[in-house]
Image: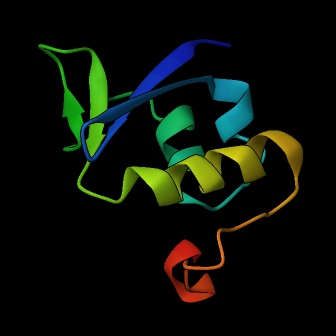
Amino acid sequence: NQRVKLNVGGAVFETWTHTLLKKPGTRLSRLARALEKDESYDADRGEYFFDRHPGIFATVMHYYRTEELHTDHNICGNIIK
């Protein structure tokens, strides 16, 4: 179990690989299982970078951690998929 740093739209999120592995088949679980870093990995910063909305990603991380999906009323559910 290792700590993973994710930079999403300039906001940095930190979590554990076991958290990302909770949802098999997702990009985040594949990233956590990867033996080699993919193209989103910035070795100079020691983080993965995703050009996505950080507020929405906070909702995604909450879902991974709690199995509960709560969204702001201004967020379209299709964005989360």
- Frontmost residue, 67 versus 2: 67
Residue 67 against residue 5 in the figure, above or below: below
In the picture, residue 8 is in which quadrant?
top left
**The N terminus lies in quadrant:** top right
> In the rendered image of this protein, does residue 80 appear above or below residue 41?
below
**Residue at horizontal 27 percent and vertical 15 percent from the top:** 46
Relative placement, left or right, of 23 versus 43 is right
Q: Residue furthest left?
A: 44
Q: Is residue 37 above or below residue 58?
A: above
Q: Position of residue 6 (x, y in %)?
A: 40, 32
Q: Position of residue 25 (x, y in %)?
A: 64, 62
Does 63 sit left or right of 7 as displayed?
A: right
Q: 49 or 36: nearer the eye? A: 49
Question: Which of the image's four quarters has the C terminus?
Answer: bottom right
Q: Is residue 43 left or right of residue 16?
A: left
Q: Position of residue 11 (x, y in %)?
A: 34, 35
Q: Which residue lies furthest to the right in this view?
A: 67
In the image, what residue occupies the spot 36% across and 59% down?
A: 53
**Residue farthest to the front?**
73
Residue at 46% across / 35% down in the picture?
A: 34
Instruction: Describe residue 10's horizontal placement relative to residue 65 as left or right.
Output: left
How many marks are shown on the rendered structure? 0
Residue at image x 73%, y 28%?
18
Q: Position of residue 22 (x, y in %)?
A: 78, 44
Q: Quadrant for residue 3, please give it.
A: top right
